[in-house]
Image (cartoon, rainbow, N blue to C red):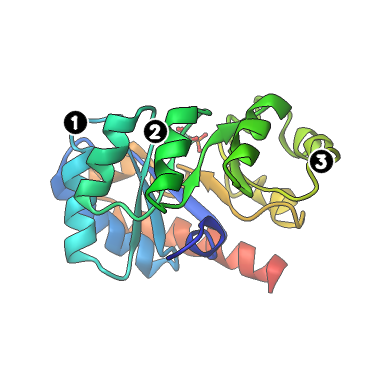
Amino acid sequence: MLNIEQVAACGVVPVVVLEDAEQAVPTAKALLAGGINAMEITFRTAAAKDSIAKVAKEVPEMIVGAGTVINVDQLHDALDAGAKFIVSPGTSEEVIAEAVKLNVPVAPGVVTPSEIMIGLKYGLKVFKFFPAESYGGLKTIKALCGPFPQIRFIPTGGINQNNAEEYFKNPKIVAVGGSWMVTKDMVVAGDFAGITEKSAAATALFKQIRG
Ligand code: 3PG
């Protein structure tokens, strides 16, 4: 069983929004070609479940997870489709409890100590910090690490190639999440070469800093 740290080992977790499940496999392959081997397909569109199923079946090297999971029904749908991990924008105790019960890696979104304390109750060690830049970025993460030295973060929201470096330099950061390497526009335009290029730049930056 993977944990979230292993899922995010390449340093970048792409937040992928797909309107058409037919785009899922080429998007996954484009990310893989850029060195990203885990992707979060968000439950923001009707195509999410089919997209996860296609990637799980057709691109086995890709660790496909479900993002924007805000309730237990979505969690079950995601797992039925083959999702290997769950990401949520916020802290739903039901979602966390169900994922932990089913032994599925889960990264809930947090910005406050109280939200972190809910995750700690379930033994979680890695949290999504969302929306990262709006909630004070690294400065807030450092402050949260005072009372909670045992946890690490995947900051997401407002991060891109230009500001990822400061996050990568901090050991409390497992990886950063974001959509800059796989924007909706790139997917709709079929710009898979562009997705690979931006993914490769992001993973190269992570490797350069973390070795
Ligand atoms: C999101 O939920 O849209 C993600 O956090 C991505 O944020 P970004 O588009 O700012 O990278």
Q: Which residue is mark 2?
A: 68
Q: Position of residue 111 (x, y in %)?
A: 66, 28
Q: Which residue is mark 3?
A: 142
Mark found first going from the N terminus, 1 or 3: 1
Badge 2 marks a residue whose secondary structure is loop
Q: CA distance from mark 2 to mark 1?
A: 12 Å
Q: Position of residue 117 (x, y in %)?
A: 67, 32
Distance from mark 1 CB to nearest ligand 1 atom below 8 Å: no
> Residue shown at 77%/54% (left/top)?
170
Q: Position of residue 35 (x, y in %)?
A: 45, 68
Q: CA distance from mark 2 to mark 3?
A: 25 Å
Q: Which residue is mark 1?
A: 46
Image quadrant assignment for residue 32: bottom left
Q: CA distance from mark 1 to mark 3?
A: 37 Å
> Residue shown at 47%/44% (left/top)?
180
Quadrant of the image for the C terminus?
bottom right
- Identify which residue, 53 or 179, lies in the foreground: 53
Q: Amino acid at mark 1?
A: Ala
